[in-house]
Amino acid sequence: MNLKTRRFLHICLISVVWSAMVMLLDGCSAIKKAEDIEVTSVNLKSFSPVGLKGVDAVLSIGVANPTIGFTLSDIEGCIKYNGEEFATYSGGPIAIAGKTSDEYDLPCSLHLSPAFSLFTALKIAASGNLEGLTTDVQAKVTLKGGIHKTLKYVDMPIKDLMDDSEE
């Protein structure tokens, strides 16, 4: 797998994490000071191809959480290219301990949609351009004690998520 393709795969998988964390920070008022939760790092720990149109991966995520513990589960979404579903992804669960700063492993998978060929995906990857890539995501956030909420976001630009990660 060439460097541009590996970077594009990395960006797609990282969008899973950023999407889920943006949802948590924006939508869960039950966690006081949720905006203080910080994703400190996201790295591709391992991946393995699944046929010609999929990948299973484990992301290593650094999270500084000054609030109570919570679990992100049932993370599901899709990546769209110019409004057309490009790939679907799923991940989790991941339990984030309260009042800690630690690294967590997030198992996830990414599969190209039937409408997109591997060649088309490689062409998009080779361009290195994130314009036109958006993501829809939903996940369940569960607090200690079982209180939970399912959060859903639509058409979040991946370029904006990646720009936020570089700050």
Image (cartoon, grey):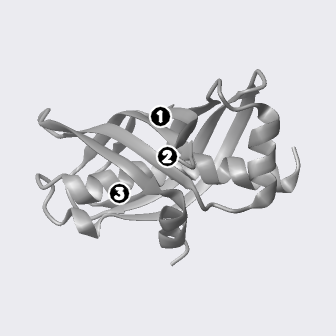
Q: Secondary structure at mark 3?
A: helix
Asked whether disc 2 touches disc 3, contact meaning CB atoms under 8 Å apart, the reply is no
On the image, the x and y values in percent for residue 90 come to 48, 32
Q: Earlier in the sequence, mark 2 or mark 3?
A: 2
Q: Quadrant of residue 151?
A: top left
Q: Is residue 103 visible?
A: no
Q: CA distance from mark 2 to mark 3?
A: 10 Å
Residue at image point 48% right, 63% down? 161
Crowding at mark 2 (Cα within 10 Å: few <14, some 14-19, many 20+) = many
Question: For residue 91, which numbered disc appears in the image?
Answer: 1
Residue 10, numbered circle: none
Residue 96's place in the image compared with 161, above or below, is above
Say few, some or many: other residues with alpha carbon within 10 Å of mark 1 (under 14 / 14 to 19 / 20 or more).
many
Residue at label 3? 22
Q: Closer to the camera, 106 or 9?
A: 9
Residue annotated with mark 2: 16
Query: In the image, is 91 to the left or to the right of 86?
Result: left
In the image, what residue type sits under mark 1?
Gly
> Sequence-wise, which precedes: disc 3 or disc 1?
3
Q: Residue 17: horizontal and vertical position, in percent?
A: 47, 50
Residue 59 % position (x, y): 58, 45
Identify the residue at image location x=39%, y=42%: 137
